[in-house]
Each structure stands twice: as C-alpha cells, then as structure tokens.
Image (cartoon, coloured by chain):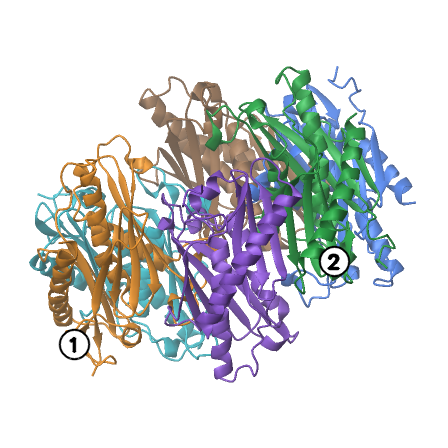
Chain colours: A green, B blue, C brown, D purple, E cyan, F orange
Amino acid sequence: MRPSKRAADEMRAVSFERNVARYAEGSCLIKFGETHVLCTASLEDKPPMWLRGQGRGWVTAEYAMLPRATQTRTRREVTSGKQSGRTQEIQRLIGRSLRAVVDLQMLGERQITLDCDVLQADGGTRTASITGAWVALHDCLKWMRSRSIIRDMPLKDHVAAISCGIANGEAVIDLDYVEDSAAQTDANFVLTGKGNIVEVQATAEGAPFDEQQLQQMMALAKQGIGKLVDMQKQTVA
Amino acid sequence: MRPSKRAADEMRAVSFERNVARYAEGSCLIKFGETHVLCTASLEDKPPMWLRGQGRGWVTAEYAMLPRATQTRTRREVTSGKQSGRTQEIQRLIGRSLRAVVDLQMLGERQITLDCDVLQADGGTRTASITGAWVALHDCLKWMRSRSIIRDMPLKDHVAAISCGIANGEAVIDLDYVEDSAAQTDANFVLTGKGNIVEVQATAEGAPFDEQQLQQMMALAKQGIGKLVDMQKQTVA
Amino acid sequence: MRPSKRAADEMRAVSFERNVARYAEGSCLIKFGETHVLCTASLEDKPPMWLRGQGRGWVTAEYAMLPRATQTRTRREVTSGKQSGRTQEIQRLIGRSLRAVVDLQMLGERQITLDCDVLQADGGTRTASITGAWVALHDCLKWMRSRSIIRDMPLKDHVAAISCGIANGEAVIDLDYVEDSAAQTDANFVLTGKGNIVEVQATAEGAPFDEQQLQQMMALAKQGIGKLVDMQKQTVA
Amino acid sequence: MRPSKRAADEMRAVSFERNVARYAEGSCLIKFGETHVLCTASLEDKPPMWLRGQGRGWVTAEYAMLPRATQTRTRREVTSGKQSGRTQEIQRLIGRSLRAVVDLQMLGERQITLDCDVLQADGGTRTASITGAWVALHDCLKWMRSRSIIRDMPLKDHVAAISCGIANGEAVIDLDYVEDSAAQTDANFVLTGKGNIVEVQATAEGAPFDEQQLQQMMALAKQGIGKLVDMQKQTVA
Amino acid sequence: MRPSKRAADEMRAVSFERNVARYAEGSCLIKFGETHVLCTASLEDKPPMWLRGQGRGWVTAEYAMLPRATQTRTRREVTSGKQSGRTQEIQRLIGRSLRAVVDLQMLGERQITLDCDVLQADGGTRTASITGAWVALHDCLKWMRSRSIIRDMPLKDHVAAISCGIANGEAVIDLDYVEDSAAQTDANFVLTGKGNIVEVQATAEGAPFDEQQLQQMMALAKQGIGKLVDMQKQTVA
Amino acid sequence: MRPSKRAADEMRAVSFERNVARYAEGSCLIKFGETHVLCTASLEDKPPMWLRGQGRGWVTAEYAMLPRATQTRTRREVTSGKQSGRTQEIQRLIGRSLRAVVDLQMLGERQITLDCDVLQADGGTRTASITGAWVALHDCLKWMRSRSIIRDMPLKDHVAAISCGIANGEAVIDLDYVEDSAAQTDANFVLTGKGNIVEVQATAEGAPFDEQQLQQMMALAKQGIGKLVDMQKQTVA
C-alpha cells in the first residue's frame, strides 16, 4: 500500500490554471496534488549572445523554490551567491525538454524564458514544471502569433513529464515527498504527445534495479503522460 | 485626476488571504490592487548566532520578486550572485517594522523569518509586504502558543504601512506603478495600531518638497493605515 | 544631560578642509567632532552605460569605512566579497541627495563619482558624507567650468544633512556614537539651502514615536542644516 | 559508417594505469581512446559535517577539465567563480554511481573523495571517470585494509559506465567528440558488475527517440560494460 | 637627470606622524613625498583559527587604496568582489616583513592586524606601508605592555623598505610614479635595522638586468633604509 | 647533509617531454624529481581587450594544482570561488618571466596563454612551470611559423628558473618539499639563456639573511639555470 493510498498507476489530482500572471506573455499555475508550480513564459526580442545572427531562436528555463515551499524553510540560493547543482540540473532539464518540441528556426531570432517557481513542494516539482511550462510556452507563442510576431506556431508537439519509482519493490507513478524519500529508485520520464522519448533519467537511490523494472516504470510513465497531454489539450482548447 | 481615477485619499482594493502556504507556521497572501505578495512566517528554534545565550529572540525578513512579477522580466538576483541594494533596503525595513511590535524577550531564544515574495508587482510592494507579514507573524505566534511553545502572545501592537507621494503637486495615497514613476516625491509610512510612527521615509525624486507636503502625506497615511489595521483585525479575528 | 554635555540643539564642532586629495577634481575632508570623512569628486567623461546617448549626466556616490575607523576593527567588505546592506543604503542616499541639487542636463554626458571614505567614525557618518560631498562636488564643477568643459555651474542649490534622535525622551541633534547607541529614535534629514526637504528618514529603534516628536526633530534639523549651509558658503567663497 | 570506422558495438581502445599519483591512497589514469582522465581517491578521517555522529561514511566526487584538454582552450571555472551546471551534474553522477556499490556503514565515519581530472577530452569523459574512479576507490580501500583502518572491503560490486547514442538512425557505443556532436540521442549507462542498473540517462538532442532505440542502446551498454568490468578485474588482480 | 631632479641616491621627503587614528592601538601616517599611507595596528585577543592552541600569536596585514588615491579613479575592489593579485601580493609582503622582526612566541595567543590604506599614491606604496606599519606595530606593542598584556616587547629589530630601479641605465632609489612607469627594472628591498635582508624582489620590466646592477640597487637600498630606520627611532623615541 | 642526500649544488633529475597534449599548439610535461607540471601553450588570434588595436600581442600564464598533487588533498580553488593569493603570485611571475624573452611586437595582435597544471607537487612548482612553459611556448611559436602565421620566431632568448634556499646555514639548490619546509630562506631565480636576471625573489622565512648568502644562492642559481637552458636546447633541437 502506498503512503497516499493511491494505486500503483494512480497519479495525484492534477490541475492547470492559465493566465495567472498579469504581465507574462503566457503563464500557468500547475498543481500535482500539493506540489504547486507557477510557470511563466517571457519573450525577449533577441536570442542569447552566443546565437546572434544565426536566424534561430532559443528557449531556456529557470527554476527556483520559494523558501517556505518546503516542510522546513530552505535558504534562498542568492544568500549563498549561487544556484545549487540540483537547481541547475533541473532547469537544464526543463529547457532541453521544451526545446525538443519547438522549431527554433520558425521562432526566429528571439528568446523565450520559462520561469518555473515552486510555490509549494511535495515531490515531483521538475515534472510538474515541464508539464506546466508547456502550457505557458503555448500561450506565449499564441500571443506572438496573434500579434503577427510569428506567422505559424513553432510548436511541433506536446511535451509532459512524470516521475516513477520503485517503492517496496513495486513500480509506482507520481511519488509525493514521503514516498520519494523512501523509494529505492527514482526516475523521471519526459515524453512527447506522440509518445516518443525526450528524456529518461533513472537512478538507483539504494540497491541497483534491473531492466524489467525500468520497463515497468516506462509503461506507467507512458500511460500517465498520455493523461497529462490530454489535460494540456483541454486546457489550451 | 490620478491615472487610476482614484481620489487622492483612496487606496486600491486590499485583500488578505490567510493559511495559503501549507507548510509555514503562518502565511498570508496580501493584495493591494494588482500588487500581490505571498508572506510566510517560519519558526526556527534558535536565534541567529550573534544573539545566542542572551535569552532573547529575533524577527527578520527576506524579500524577493519572481522574475515575471514585473512588466518586463527581471533577472533573478542569484544570477548576479548577490541581492541588489534595493532588495536589501526593503528587507531591512520589513524586519525593523515587525520587530517594533514584538517583545523579543517574550519570544525567547527563537527566530521567526518573514519571507515576502512578490508574485505580481504594481507599486507599493514593500508596504504590502509589511502589512501582510504582520498577519503571517500573528498566525505563527498563535501556532506557537497553541503548542505551548510560548505562554503569551509577544505581539505588542499591529503594524501596517502605506506609500504616499506628491503627484501633480498634490499629496496622494497608495501609488501604483504608473503613478509612482511620475511622482515628484515618494514616501513610505509605517505606523502601529495606536497610530505611532515606526518609520517614515520620504524622498524627493525630482524637486525638493516642503514641510507642509510632508504633513499632508502623513495625514493621508494615518487614515489609510487605520483602515489597514482594521482589516488586519477582521482577518485574524 | 547629553553624554557629550552638549545642549539639545548643539551640534559638534564642524570643519571643512578643501583640496586635500592631490589628484581629485574636487575634495573635502569634513569633520563632525570625531567623525572624519574624506570626500572626493571624480569626473569621468561618459555617463554610466544605461544613460548613454540621452544627453544627460549622472552623479553617484560610494561609501566605505577604513577597517580601523571604528572602536574595534571592522572586517573589510572585500573580504566577504560584497557590500553590506548598510553600506548600500548609505551610498544610495548620498547619491540621491546630491543629484537633487544638480541639473543633470547641464552636466552633459558625464559622470561624477563622490567617494566618501570614513577615516574615523563617531556617529553621523552619512550626514557628514553628504555635507562634505557637496563641497567636493562644487569644486569639481568649478574645475570643469574653469577648463570650459561646462559653461555654467549645474548646481541648483546647497544640500546638507544632519542626524537627530529622541534620547531620554527629548529631541536632540547630531548624535555621537554613544548617544546614538542608546537613542530610542534615529532620524536623518537632508535639506537644501532654501530649506526644502530632499530626504527624511526616521526610525524607531525601540518604542514607536509620535508626530510631535518628528516635528521637534525636523525643527532641530532645519536650524542645524542652516548653519552647515552657511559653513559650506564660507568654505567655497 | 561511423566517423572512427568502428563497428556499432565497438568501443575505443581502453587502458587502465594504477598508482599514477604518488601521494593519493588510490589512483588510476584511464584512457578511452583520446579521452584521458586522472582519477585519484583521497581518504579523510571524518565524514562531511552533515553526517557526523551517524556511524556512516561518505563517498563523493569532483570533476574538472584542464583548460587545454579540449580542441580550443576552455576558461578555468575558478575565473568565473563557480562550477558550471555541466560540471556539477557530472560530479554528482560520479559520486552517486560509486556510492551505489559501497557499504557506507562498513566504511565508518570517513570520507573518500574521488577527483576526476580530465587531461584530454574526446567525448565520454564522464563514463571514463566513473570506470576509472572505481579502480582508484578499490585501491584506496585496499590501502585502508592493509593498514587495518577497516577490517573488510566495503565494496559490494564493480561499477562501470559507457555512453551510447543514436547516430544516423543507428544505435552506437562509446561516441567520440565528433560523433557525439552529430548524434540525435545521447545516453549514459552506469551498470554494476552483476549487470544491474545504477543510472540511465538518455536525452534526445534532436528528434525524440522511441522505446526500441532505448532498448538497443541498453543492449550495447550491457555488452560494453561487461568488457570494462572484466578489464577492471584484470587491473586490480 | 631624474624626472624629480633628485640625485640617484636621494629619497623623497619622508615624514612619520604617530597616533593619527583615535581608536587604533597603534597608528602612523607615513609620507614618502606625495605617497601617503595610513597604517593602523589592531589587536585581537585570539590568534587566527589555524593557530589556536599553539601558544603563539600572529601578525598579518591588509592593504588597500582609496579609489581616488590615484591619478584617475580606480574601481573599489569590493565592486568586483575580490582583491586583485597585486593587492594580495602586497599585503602578503607587508605581513611577512613585519613577522620577520616579531617574536610570535612572546606575543602569545593574539593577533595584530596592520591595515595599510593608501590615501594618496605616487609610487612606492608598498615600501612606505612596511616602513610606517613598523611604527604602528611598535606603538601597539607598547600599548599592550603598558596595560601588562605582555611583559616584554616582542620586537626583535626595526624593519623598513625602499624601492630601487634601473632608469636610463642607472640605479636610482625611491622612484615616484612617473619614474617607475619608465624604469627598466623595479626592485623592492626590505631590510632590518641591523642591515640584514628580509626580502628582495627585483623584476625586469623591459630588458633583463645583470648581477652588478642588482648589487648597485642593493647598495642604494642599504643606505636609504639606514636613514629610514634612524627616522623610525626618532619617531618612537 | 641534505634530506635528499644531494650535494648543495645538485639539482634533482630533470626531464622534459614535448607534445604531450594532443590539442595544444605547444606542450611540455616537465619533471623536477617528483614535481610534475603539465605546461600547454594556447594561441588565441586576438590580444586581451585592453591591448586591442596597438599592434602588439600578449603572453600570459595560469597556474593550478590538481587537488591530489599534494601530500594531503587540497581543496579546489573553484570551491571557494577565487584563486588564492599564492596562485595569483605564481601565475603573474610565470607570465612576466616568459614575456621577458618574447618580442610582443613581432607576435602581432595575438595572445598565447601558458597553462601550468601541477600534476604532482614536491617543491619548486613555480620554477618547473617557468622552465617547462618556455618549451611549450617555443613549440607554439614554431607551430605558428610553420603555418605562416608569423614570419620569424619572436623568441629573443631562453628563460629558466630554479629555487635556492639557506638550509642549516648553507646555500642549496632546487629544494624539495621537505627541505623547503625547514629552510630559513626561500629564493627563486629566473634567468635568461645569456645569464641575465629576469626576476629575483628572496624571502627570509625565519631569521633574516645577509648579502653574502644572497650571492651564494645567486651563484648556485646561475650554474643550475645554465644546465636547464642546455636541456631546453636539446629538447627543442
């Protein structure tokens, strides 16, 4: 039995709320149970320095947690003067995931920054960030098209993400903080709307796992991400 | 006529929402019109290093803005490795303001950190922060008393704050971003529930102002803060 | 009775010494009793990056204390890699105060940096800095005019500053370190030669104060700053 | 045809050289073709601060590249004052991989740091680092046992790593820099001597990939890591 | 002919002023012509962390220049977040030079910090710093003895320093900024009162120099430092 | 008797290995006994920013030690966010030494960076770095000439360096770590192929030394550097 009484393949209640940030070109407050992430998309009319003059754009992401998103207060990263390795890993993952479904040529010499700020954290913040950031990005691109900044939507597909794990020897989906802390294996899957793989990261926290367990987690992820993509579709419909 | 069509002594719509952060000992989402600040109070069971062994506690504050709280995206402070002078001024002001109404002896050897994170910014973020942080602090202290960590409430009075300015030669209250940008004088008042002064900061942005104008702004502030204190009372009732 | 035996409205002995820094375009060693600040004005022939091409100039300030300006040695800020919040507040205040009396259009696309380095600190370093920096700035502008870099003096008025406080329930002027440490309220006033207000900052260190006390401090400040402005006039005559 | 003319399942020439660092408790210079990494193991007789008093030890890793390990000179990270996100990701991966095969209880309250310094870089530096660090770690533990610091070897298994990718639509193993730059998918596998999974990271650089391709890469990795583990056995025999 | 019209073996006018910093345990304002350095000695009643419990004390130094000590304004080091290599070299040299004449055992578990702050810079700031710091250190130790913190003076000898150079092919002493900028060779000598060598640093700025030139500079330095030591004796007499 | 049983004028076994870094324009692995330094020369086709447009080039150096080059592990400098004073002193010395024998005019608007990375440290790392860097620089310049980037070799002479010291009252050459730690005086000499002086640094670690001892060390250094220059000649022949 999972700590949350959920079935092995049962995700937490998921909700998307669009247009939550008055000034952003696109925004989405996504909730995976008690994990709440505010995703905003900000358009800048020039690409990063290293990409100037190549006719292509860029999509990047930044990730942070409010100090009291967590059970006990976490020190702000600015106080230590730099982002932790964990923060950098996560924001690099979010950026890569979104870029996988954007046609950077069609975007033109512009940059979109996806800020994923965790208001409340109960496990799965990076997968919620990717899933919510897609909506913010979509709305930003729509905003751009409505102003004729771009002619067509440079969005090739949906992208969404979910965590899986091996807990008590069984593959489970969408772990909350308590379950995640005790799991033997921690995995994150990022898939497209068509079900292709953008990123797989699976890590043994305790004992190494076997290939069959990886496949079980992959199966759960496919199913769960399918549902998330359906919800994205309804949200932006 | 003010850009917002408000009368000179008319504040924006103000609202307080308590218990918005699941894990914090006290929290309040305060809104002054389109300015939204999430205030949380976090209890730590020891005071800062420099105060150890003196039988007293401490109340401190940290302030930050989400990157897309603003009209155009603002760089995260962690990227430049340090807090700006503006951020430090504001968080020092919030901390001083709250400490003015707390009996640090009664608090005992503990520290409460008030995190004021601006989700959306339309002028007056520091005064909204102080006003909302008082509610978060109140609820944190009540939480402590309900668990017998403290016997009595170490809160001596209310504290709330409002901005005033001289715009088009006239004293006005609670300026939004547009009005603030054009104002000749920018002032912040922090008063207690009894109407005493905790802090006055008045700055000529353009031409210097005179004593009479300072008194006009003070009168507006007294009236406005009176209303804010009434709302605090209703909120925590 | 004040610790220094001075009357409530009696400032410490104040002196100005011009041309103390051989290489600076303007300089002044100002003393408020045992508080000694070396102020220099440095001209740069282009404005800061963000102001380029707008036909206006800029006046800015930096503030620091020698490590042994104080009773016990203070760590250099460079050792911790950044300026403290206090330092930033003070230098922003000095910059704002001086800009309030300069016509930045007349200055043209140039920048003047006022460095206020505290050689010895006995309270009131920020007010001494502002008062002395005005002389350094004046002499820098005169130097510029004498070399036909500018045609007319872009200095609209004098500006000077003094601290006041409530000590033992009574409003007093120009507090030294001992008195300041024990005062209930700490205030700084920056006024122009004409007696208008550039900046008022009043903070309750202990109990909140009332409006009448603010007015008493304001009255003391007006009188004191009047004397400081007279001394500035004699100094640059 | 691969740029290196190798078959799809053919790794580069791999060599291990032990005892290359005179002062380290264990060391190994590992070469995967033109990728050369110097791995050292350093014993410290206390665990990191956050683990004190828990009766367990810790294994951690640091990773860096010499400035001219690369085709064009890379700026030292110390010049920008912090490690890049990439460096932090890699050293966290190396540490996790080695900890997966160490009994931290048996290690006792000590820390072993594995430094992986890339002398020459031609792709696959992180997988070479993990594979070589195992030898340095083994030799460090043997050194400890020979001095009776520990009674038994706390090493539960081998661990080794290899990169795979999808290049020209085909799964290939152990990509060099040229092949890696052009590959559609980049994956790293960390497996134990028994063939279990410690970590899988697979990222679509261009088009997303499918589950079958993931399995093809996994099959290549299993075979390749089997050979690396055999070489580790011969090296420490 | 030297730019300053001085003879090859002629130093600039040198003066020492004691007790210039009200709060420091020892202080000296030293002038070598237009080079002015304020040296203070600060006593701390414990040694640096790494020396605790060894029964010995420590003498260290810090060096800085006011921003407008120089012909054109120099950026404060705190703005870039760290001391330059030049600053670190100089303060390490000052510390080593003073430690060479102090009996650290007799000093006991204490630390004396010598702050050398350059108020005005016209070449030779490091040699003026060493020479003036000796006086500040002497007075600090005397202060300690007068309060019975130490029984005997732990000062074994005088120490003073002077720069020499090869300018227009000729060895010259005590170069000012103009001469130093054009010199082929730049050398600094630190000698004790008995004429022994504490430090020699000689650097070819342009063409390498020969041993004979080194000896000529050494001869000049011996003579000059002899005079400086005589002045130190008169100053502290 | 020296700890290493060597005669007072006997250097350790010295070896040079060229072309050790596949991608660098020039490289040399130099060994002074157990001190091993990897020196690479990297060509950049523009000079540093401050030298642009002056028709001259620049030669600079960076120095670092691998964490386990030393007897006990040394923290990486990047972890503390900045280079130590020692590192900066050393790399400034290496850069100055090499520039002394390069015609920067002939080099043209380019920069060569000499990276000296200490793989193993047993005293004398800075002198080994200078001596080995000369070979790397020579090979880089030859590489440039062979590609007609320059017409003639801008190398005016050899440069090499050796340490000397006073140990047990006697002048000795090329101290290893053990001898260096106990020596009373530590000196480094940098001479050209013609025997002229580029840099002399002599420091009393304990008791000050006299002029005769300086001359004895200089004599040893001349002889030793003569041998090093001969070896450089054979290496690049």
Few, some or many residues within 10 Å of mark 2 (<14, 14–19, 20+): many
In percent of width and height, residue B76 lies at 60, 39
What is the chain identity of the residue bearing mark 2?
A
Q: Quadrant of residue D207?
A: top right
Check the image and report above or below for A168 versus C9. below
Provide the residue designation for mark 1: F8
Viewer-side label of 1, 2:
2
What is the chain identity of the residue bearing mark 1?
F
Q: Residue furthest right?
A: B237
Residue E124 — which label? none
Is disc 1 placed on a helix, strand or loop? Answer: loop
Q: Quadrant of the N terminus of chain A?
A: bottom right
In percent of width and height, residue A190 lies at 68, 42
Q: Quick check: marks 1 and 2 in contact, CB under 8 Å?
A: no
F235 sits left or right of A9 in the view: left
Q: Is residue B130 visible?
A: no
Q: Quadrant of residue F144?
A: top left
Task: Out of C224 and A43, give the one closest to the viewer.
Answer: A43
Provide the residue designation for mark 2: A166
F149 sits left or right of B143 in the view: left
In percent of width and height, residue F34 lies at 29, 70
In percent of width and height, residue E94 lies at 32, 61
Is disc 2 placed on a helix, strand or loop? Answer: strand
Q: Quadrant of the C terminus of chain A?
A: top right
Check the image and report above or below for D234 versus C77. below
To the question of a shared chain for discs 1 and 2, the answer is no
Which residue: 61% across, 65% down?
A: D100
Q: What amino acid is at disc 1? A: Ala
